[in-house]
Image (cartoon, rainbow, N blue to C red):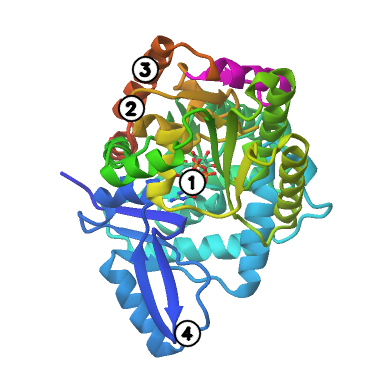
Amino acid sequence: MKRRVIIVSMRLPVTVTVEHGRPTVRPSVGGLATGLRSVYAEDDGVWIGWPGRVEELDAAEERTLREHLAALHTVPVYLTAHETTVFYEGIANGVLWPVFHDRLDQLPLRVHGWDVYEQVNARFADTVARHYHPGDLIWVHDYQLLRVPAILRELLPEARIGFFLHIPFPNPEIFFALPSREWLLRGMLGADLIGFHTWRFRGHFTAAMRRLLHLQPEREEAMYEGRRIQLGVFPMGIDAAGYAERGASPRVLAEVARLRSDRDVRFLVGVDRLDYSKGIERRLLAFERLLQTHPEWSTRVRLVQIAVPSRAGVSAYRRLRERVDGLVGRINGAFGTPRWTPIHYMYRSVSDDLLVALYRAADVMVVTPVRDGMNLVAKEFAASRTDEDGVLVLSEFAGAAEELTDALLVNPYDVDGTAEAMHRALVMPREERHARMRALRRVVQTNDVARWVERFIGALAANGASEER
Ligand code: GDG
């Protein structure tokens, strides 16, 4: 029998806008929303999350918003302005994000706000409890909600609770820097199933359990407070068929033709949120190095870098933006000519069609994060390439590297080595490009987002039976 699923994530899969006091709600098309639509929208399930900052609404407007959201099977959890600052920007994005991405240098000197973190997590858990019917499966997502499983376990001792971490779980030596490390770990352990993108992250997690809680977890499960907890590896996929269809559509191909109107200029493409985990600065330096060491590429190659504005309320992100602006200006100033600009830099998001057109136009896609849970951009690139062409340069430090072994794998800290990989990708013979791309496409097609959802829900519903690949 199919069981109802309650999804719990920081953000709802909708975009809310308020114009002239009238709230409107549109479903968003992100990977998670697409993959999970089949479980929350079609089977009477529900998705609980934050609709984003909505202006102050009066009671009638709030009711309208709630009705719109209910029609999309979603339930809002609101944050006050103070909570947005302390919980979301302060703790989640200012403390947990850097630590989980190995960036202790980004930690504020004094960390405070754990009480607000607990308070917001408790509100999420309360909302879940209000919508819960016995037999439902609860699936909690990500680092903003690490305490939700434990709070829910108190409220609903019998419930089946799954937790998936979308970002890396760091090496315990780094995790231990968190003042509230034990409390956070115990938060996750409220779940019956804890999922990670990779074997490595799961290994870090079990090591932290051993050293901090003196537990003896096995590789795939652990006993904790008399309960058996499954520890699973579920590398997230994408809507591969959707990207293939868009990639082959006449609109996108027309855009590709416009982008590639100058046949003599080769294209490198990078697409990231502007985040220090994405390795954008070293990528720009590697591109500069390519122009220095291989001057034959001068005027014959360009890097199109999309940097999507992100977390501008956190000072580390504002500083990063200034550094990237400076680097782009310096490199273009040093190498540009009246008819050629080496780096085309866009600090904004682009439409889905333009995004896929860039994937299709790229001779080389450069995905070089210094740390990344998975990285869906790398997978979307491969899925879009129905022409079976294009080379992926991929960081060893992206979770995706465990699966996409036919990419040119690079160490993003090795700027010279990354520059050489860019060169190698640009001169790679056609046969080799096709062979590698075919292999990449097989992986993303087989392990798509629908399969990811099936595997996680299957393991959660299986009452403890292991669902390892
Ligand atoms: C977290 C983890 C993990 C980007 N620019 C535009 C645009 N995008 C879309 C991409 C892709 C998504 O945003 C970015 O996903 P990533 O996986 O690359 O990165 P994070 O946002 O950091 O996601 C990550 C992921 O969670 C899932 O578990 O893989 O490691 O950090 O889907 O297509 N979309 C459009 N315009 C843009 O300009 N339309």
Does 341 sit above or below residue 427? below
Which residue lies under the disc numbered 1?
A: 190
> What is the number of the mark on residue 467?
2
Query: Distance between the Cα atoms at labels 1 and 2?
Result: 20 Å
Query: Distance between the Cα atoms at labels 2 and 3?
Result: 25 Å
Q: Amino acid at mark 2?
A: Glu
Q: Judge the density around disc 1: few (<14), some (14-19), many (≥20) Cα neighbours within 10 Å.
A: many
Q: 207 or 421: nearer the eye?
A: 421
**How many numbered markers are drawn?**
4
Earlier-in-chain disc, 1 versus 2: 1
Query: Pointer 3 and pointer 1: residues touching (CB < 8 Å)?
Result: no
Tell me which residue sits at (37%, 13%) in the image: 435
Query: Distance between the Cα atoms at labels 4 and 1?
Result: 35 Å
Earlier-in-chain disc, 4 versus 1: 4
Earlier-in-chain disc, 2 versus 4: 4
For residue 165, side relative to residue 15 (left or right): right
Q: Position of residue 453 (x, y in %)?
A: 32, 40
Q: Judge the density around disc 3: few (<14), some (14-19), many (≥20) Cα neighbours within 10 Å.
A: some
Q: 305 or 320: nearer the eye?
A: 305
Earlier-in-chain disc, 3 versus 4: 4
Which residue lies under the disc numbered 4?
A: 57
Q: 101 or 307: nearer the eye?
A: 307
Could you tell me if residue 319 is visible in this image?
A: yes
Q: Nearer the viewer, mark 3 or mark 4?
A: 3
Say which element carries label 4. loop
